[in-house]
Amino acid sequence: MSSQKCQRQTKQRQIILDELRKLTTHPHASALYELVRKRLPKISLGTVYRNLELLAETGDIQKIPVSSTQARYDGNTHPHYHVHCLRCDKIDDVEEFAKSIGVKDLKKLKGYDIINCHMQFEGLCPRCQKGEKNA
């Protein structure tokens, strides 16, 4: 998805984006804040939250709403879905499903011009099914 750059790209925002794009863990804002502080020690948690919201609004990142917990963030903006473990709160990407059922199929089925899609699966990850603790 291309971003609609109506805001100037600040150094803080670029570092937040860079750090998020290094991850595949879909962090909360507070976890990302801890990583960003290593590069910008004086940054505030509020600044990280505001910039994440702005980056999500412009399409530079995805905001993943998770039931009953804080929102999570994903630097991968390519079409894909997520699976959320209800026990340990882990979120994984589900790339295969996005490839097997595309938005083109929906357009054929109902005539909509699809701009965006949010789909999330919920269940128990393999480690939680075995009673193990995730790292």
Image (cartoon, helix red, strand yellow):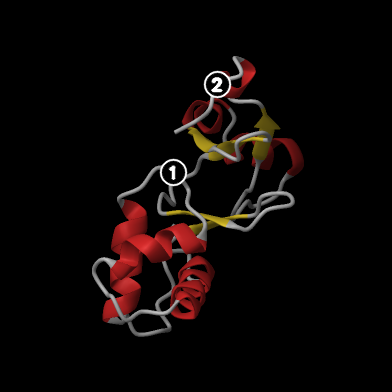
Residue at 66% across, 50% down = 66
Spot occupied by residue 127 in the image (x, y as percentages of width and height)? 54, 21
Q: Nearer the viewer, residue 122 or 44?
A: 44
Asked whether the viewer can see residue 113, the reply is yes
| Amino acid at dot 1 | Thr
Question: Nearest the camera: 7 or 70?
Answer: 70
Using the numbered discs, state the Cα–Cα distance from disc 2 to disc 1 in whole angstroms.
Answer: 18 Å
In front of the other: label 2 or label 1?
2
111 and 101: which is toward the camera: 101
Which residue matches tag 1?
25
In terms of image quadrants, where is residue 85?
Answer: top right
The residue tagged with tag 1: helix, strand or loop? Answer: loop
Report x, y in % for residue 120.
65, 40
In this view, which residue lies farthest toward the top?
Answer: 130
Q: Along the horizontal axis of the image, is 121 left or right of 110?
A: left
- Percent across and percent down for residue 9 are 32, 80
Residue with the mark numbered 2: 132
Query: Circle 2 — which element?
Result: loop
